[in-house]
Amino acid sequence: MPSNQFIPDIVIGRLPQYLRTLQRMESENRIITSSQELAERIGISAAQIRKDLSLFGEFGKQGTGYDIHFLIEKLRSILKVDRIWDIVVVGAGDIGSALARYQGFTNRGFRVAMLFDKDPAKIGTKIGNFVVQDSRYLSDAVQRANIKIGMIAVPSSEAQNVADQLVRGGVRAILNYAPISINVPPVVHVQYIDPVIHLQRMTYYLD
Amino acid sequence: MPSNQFIPDIVIGRLPQYLRTLQRMESENRIITSSQELAERIGISAAQIRKDLSLFGEFGKQGTGYDIHFLIEKLRSILKVDRIWDIVVVGAGDIGSALARYQGFTNRGFRVAMLFDKDPAKIGTKIGNFVVQDSRYLSDAVQRANIKIGMIAVPSSEAQNVADQLVRGGVRAILNYAPISINVPPVVHVQYIDPVIHLQRMTYYLD
DNA sequence: TACCAATGGTATAATGGTTAACAAATTGAA
DNA sequence: TTCAATTTGTTAACCATTATACCATTGGTA
């Protein structure tokens, strides 16, 4: 059944995992896989994977499994990473610098395009392949470059302000590394990365 | 009702968010809050917060709300971050370095205690307050220091190997920054941080 | 060819999680 | 003191997700 229907967000959240695992299999020169093998590598049930994929089409072959390359292309298309998205990074501290230099975006649909900071001591310096630009011009630059994705790597106290500027510049997806919730219009998507949240989730289970 | 019963993991996953928001309120010199205010700041329903908290006890006062400081202490105790956990960071590249220098662990229950890498060019150099140690001795060092939490910030190809060493050294919680699933015994908890996964989850909703 | 084992897709059942509603408790103001 | 406005903890209804069971199809093998 094709995907005219509504797809639960929790399903969308698993697709990138499937894609990542399939791309790794492909890099291992594998041609075919099964829902069972995928499930084992990811750590969820095979039925779950089959059900998730069936929401978008019939990508497998009974008795055989899934063609890895074919499924990768399908998932890339569904997730809209069959293209390269430019990203703006705001904050040129340790985290922003690591993001600017990170080699893992390539081939997964993304490319850091600009790096901003408000610190005069950093503006103009080079980090990775980027010259740090003045946050003052963030909104305009983002708009002119038609950038839709931003990453926030500034102190918590600045995060909301930066988010507002990104939204004003037309950004529609934000990955926030500052450990604070931000408010954006409903049309803008936000995801959070806070290592402490993950750590605290695990300490509950430790002695 | 006290928490002799089983608590769903999804509830545990929300508690750190509550804690983070409450601590921010406290830093704003707030004394009392309500489930409704918390809900608005976090972006979930008030009923959810009340229900989650009720699994652990009666922490609020009808007609008034929750004492922020009191609730913080309760959550810290539940999540076992009413102490300081030592962490070992493996990988002294951009991500590992950013983690070693990150000031956000303090006051939230964690402290980076050691930093390892296998690259001879890095071993012995200083990053933040840490001298990079030889990965060769990872297992032993972790065991001697009785460290229970590790962060993996090495290339994907090394992640499983590092995870094995950490587990051998007695680590029981792993935060993996390498974009690959790792296999560990059931007693060991793993969380993943892969920015691309978050990004791909958002691009689905973009035009 | 005929059969068998493996596999995907799908319908159904079971489980789990979220929301809505409300009584009881509290506060503050009239 | 009395009353209105809040707010919690909890129940029950509702909704969403996951697991189960099964059939159809495929490819390999004897």
Image (cartoon, coloured by chain):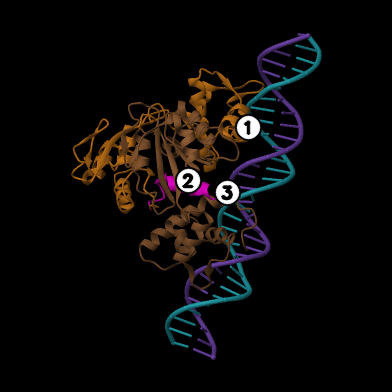
Chain colours: A orange, B brown, C cyan, D purple
Which residue lies at the image location 48% right of the left edge and 25% below the top edge?
A: A23
Q: Nearer the viewer, mark 1 or mark 2?
A: 2
Residue at mark 3 shares a chain with residue at mark 2: no
Any part of residue B106 in sight: yes
Secondary structure beneath dot 2 equals helix
Compare residues B136 and A123 and report the one nearer the observer: B136
Secondary structure beneath dot 3 equals helix
Three-letter code, disc 1: Ala
- Find out whether residue A186 is within the magenta segment: yes
Q: Are marks 3 and 2 in contact (CB under 8 Å)?
A: no
Residue position marked by numbered label 3 in the rendering: B9
**Other-residue count near label 1 (Cα within 10 Å), few / some / many at <14 / 14–19 / ≥20:** some
Which chain does tag 1 point to?
Answer: A
Residue position marked by numbered label 1 in the rendering: A46
- Tell me where the magenta segment starts and ends, as one range: A183-207
Q: Earlier in the sequence, mark 1 or mark 2?
A: 1
Residue position marked by numbered label 2 in the rendering: A198
From this viewpoint, which residue is outermost toward the front? B144
Which chain does tag 2 point to?
Answer: A
Image-based side of A160 in relation to B136, left or right = left
